[in-house]
Amino acid sequence: MIDIKNISKSFGDKEVLKDISALFKPSVSTLIIGSSGSGKTTLMKCMVGLHEPNEGHVEYDGRDFTALSFKERIDIRKEVGMLFQSSALFDSMTVEKNILFPLNMFTDMPRGEKKDRVNFVLERVNLAGTNKLFPAELSGGMKKRVGIARAIAMSPKYLFCDEPNSGLDPKTSILIDELIQEITIENNITTVVVTHDMNSVMGIGEHIIFLHQGQKWWEGSNKEITSTDNKELNEFVFATKLMETLLKK
Amino acid sequence: MIFHHFGKYILLLKAVFRKPEKFSIYKVEIFREMVDIGLGSLGIISIISVFIGAVTTVQTAFQLVSDLIPKSVIGGITRDSTILELSPTICSLVLAGKIGSSIASQIGTMRVTEQIDALEIMGINAPGYLILPKVVAGVLMIPMLVIISIFLSIMGGYLAGTASGAITSADFIQGLTTGFIPFTVTVAMVKAVVFAIIITTVSAYQGFYTNGGALEVGQSSTKAVVISCISILAADYVIAQLLL
């Protein structure tokens, strides 16, 4: 479980996040949604320690992450997996080496066991046999899946996904969403997904947080999101013609 | 502004020299970088060294018109200027262009494609993992390249001098072996080590703090070369003043 309390973050004079508190539960994919510039990615970066919040705390199962030093954070970071918007695979390494990287760095597993783990996670994301390929040889969807495989290689307790569907076709997007959802439930992971993809919202949005101008504007589920009277949320949700047409029908 | 960057540079170096997570992984990276920096630069260093020596000999011979000065002096001047100045400094300036731009663009690209963020999320000390192997490899390989450069430069001088008839083989060798001060090699090695640290760390700093996209990666790469070259020449003067 991740508990964020009163997070505020500014860059110079610009206040990007204002007093955000939320609870992220295990086995649930929590979606942080909002229009571009609403502070979604900044909030996620504050949660994982890539940005330091100006105020507030981030607690991982009661452990105050924000109060820890770089060294003290390593133990928590070993329990965190992250899928980046650009996949962030290491260009110079093959798929196998990308996934092996955290295992080599932080575990003393025998070589065979590590290889088994790589094959297991690759199979889990339906990419068995791609071990020797380089990131440049993969499609966008495959890169995302390798990113997921690398993120889950260390059996994380917390999974963060930054725009997992960006640049993907709707069909591949659904596959990625389903994969994230399945992994979350199978491994009892606390998953946080930053997205503005309404397909994801309607598909896996069991718990949704809507950010507007750096503030938590609305919180609920995909069952409630289409029937809310929140003006800004409605503008966001029904911004696409598809959603508008579906609602009319 | 300069102090702001200098402070950030010092803080980055502090993170670079933090205890590595796993020595075996760093060892592999150091060997990889040694191949890149050392073997990868051997060709260009060899070519420029031969010409540096050749030009030094021919130009020195052109300036020594007096009959009172023995021709063997040309060999001595070629040796000393090569060891003290030309090989360490010119090689380092060329390496700043070759290795420096490569380091800055490699790390800069990793920054803008979130690969450095990925390392940090995993709990890896990104400055240490990315920069330390380059610094160690540079400090080990650049002095070796300078030694090779000194040797090839003197060879180039010998060939150009004798081929052009500016000096006889015997005179050149006599000049080369007379009045040799071994301390000049120490000075060359000190310069090589200091220049290696400047090239690798300045370029890594520029790459590590790249912000934006492809355009900014290019700008970081250019800045890395310019600042490295200026720093090398400034350090060259300081070392010469202190050691000679």
Image (cartoon, helix red, strand yellow):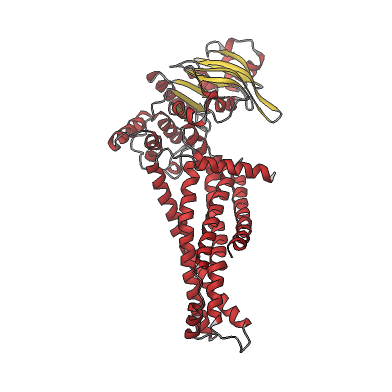
For residue A106, which quarter of the picture?
A: top left
The residue located at (44%, 45%) in the rendering is: A92
The residue located at (48%, 54%) in the rendering is: B139
- The picture places residue A149, in percent across and down from the top left corner, at 40, 31
Question: Considering only vertical position in the picture, is A248 above or below A108?
Answer: above
Please say whether residue A33 is visible from this viewpoint. Answer: yes
Residue lying furthest right: A13
- Which of the two residues, A59 or B216, is positioned nearer the viewer here? A59
Number of marks: 0
- The picture places residue A22, in percent across and down from the top left corner, at 56, 15
- The picture places residue B218, in percent across and down from the top left corner, at 60, 49
Tell me: A246 left or right of B32: right
- Quadrant of the snapshot with the C terminus of chain A: top right
For residue B95, which quarter of the picture?
A: bottom right
- Which of the two residues, B84 or B125, is positioned nearer the viewer here? B84
- Which of the two residues, A96 or B203, is positioned nearer the viewer here? B203
Tell me: B109 left or right of A214: left
The residue located at (47%, 70%) in the rendering is: B151
- The picture places residue B56, in percent across and down from the top left corner, at 57, 75
Please say whether residue B210 is visible from this viewpoint. Answer: no
The residue located at (40%, 21%) in the rendering is: A182
Question: Considering only vertical position in the picture, is B43 above or below B174?
Answer: above
Question: Considering only vertical position in the picture, is B179 above or below B116?
Answer: below
